[in-house]
């Protein structure tokens, strides 16, 4: 897949296990309790070890559309940003705005904590049933729009769990910026 340069930031799409990436922060598609679950959330908690759950207990949950940051513990990533995406209800309950807020909050937390690299999963597209094509458009556009307010963020990875999800994200990303030399 082709990386794109947008301002100072390099954006790319990959299909791999998010828990293996060595970046400043990986984003966890968390539930509002922040105490672990299935899918990406469960995989991140398992890979990080029990210390992550211990720290998450001190955060007292998180509202849908918001995000909170913890250490990465046993992960190669230094931090985990826990973003609570919306459950899809047909688009009638502000789902688009709530999903966009997850991505924006991820970039804001990177900026606030002086982090330069972040990896996002396809938030809400698993058990929360957000339509994958719609989610990809929201994810990429929101990140591109948020980057000018976070000039220190120089690497953004959209880490997808499947090739079809990766293709959807790449198609949207290709409409922004200029291709990077590989």
Image (cartoon, rainbow, N blue to C red):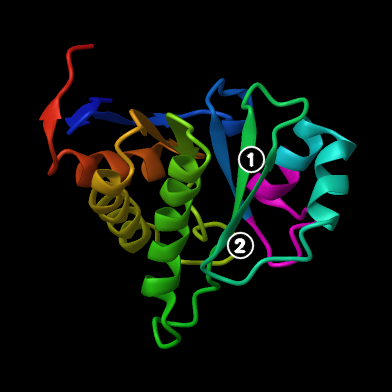
User: On residue 127, which mark appears?
Assistant: 2
Residue at position x 40%, y 29% in the image: 14
Tell me: 4 left or right of 166. Answer: left
Image quadrant assignment for residue 20? top right
Q: Nearer the viewer, residue 114 or 18?
A: 114
The alpha-carbon separation of the residues under discs 1 and 2 comes to 20 Å
Q: Which residue is mark 1?
A: 80
Where does residue 61 sit, x and y in percent of width and height?
A: 74, 66
Where does residue 81 sit, x and y in percent of width and height?
A: 59, 46
Quadrant where the N terminus sits is: top left
First of labels 1, 2 by sequence position: 1
Q: Any magenta on residue 42?
A: yes
Where does residue 91 sit, x and y in percent of width and height?
A: 39, 81
Q: Any magenta on residue 39?
A: yes
Span highlighted in magenta in the image = 30-43
Say above or below: 145 vs 11.
Answer: below
Tell me: 129 left or right of 1. Answer: right
Image quadrant assignment for residue 4? top left
Where does residue 7 sit, x and y in percent of width and height?
A: 17, 33
Image quadrant assignment for residue 51? top right
Residue at position x 77%, y 33% in the image: 48
Label 2, residues with CA under 10 Å away: few <14, some 14-19, many ≥20: few
């Amino acid at each position: 897949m082709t990386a794109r340069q947008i301002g100072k930031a390099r954006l790319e799409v990959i299909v791999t296990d998010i828990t293996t990436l060595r970046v400043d922060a990986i984003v966890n598609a968390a539930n509002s309790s922040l105490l672990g679950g299935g899918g990406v959330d469960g995989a991140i908690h398992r890979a990080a070890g029990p210390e992550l759950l211990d720290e998450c207990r001190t955060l007292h949950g998180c509202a849908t559309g918001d995000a909170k940051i913890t250490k990465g513990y046993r992960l190669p990533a230094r931090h985990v940003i826990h973003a609570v995406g919306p459950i899809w209800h047909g688009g009638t309950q502000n789902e688009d705005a709530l999903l966009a807020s997850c991505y924006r909050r991820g970039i804001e937390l990177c900026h606030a904590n002086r982090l330069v690299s972040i990896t996002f999963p396809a938030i809400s597209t698993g058990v929360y049933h957000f339509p994958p094509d719609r989610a990809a458009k929201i994810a990429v556009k929101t990140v591109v729009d948020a980057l000018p307010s976070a000039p220190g963020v120089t690497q953004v990875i959209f880490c997808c769990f499947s090739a079809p999800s990766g293709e959807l994200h790449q198609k949207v990303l290709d409409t922004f910026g200029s291709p990077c030399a590989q």
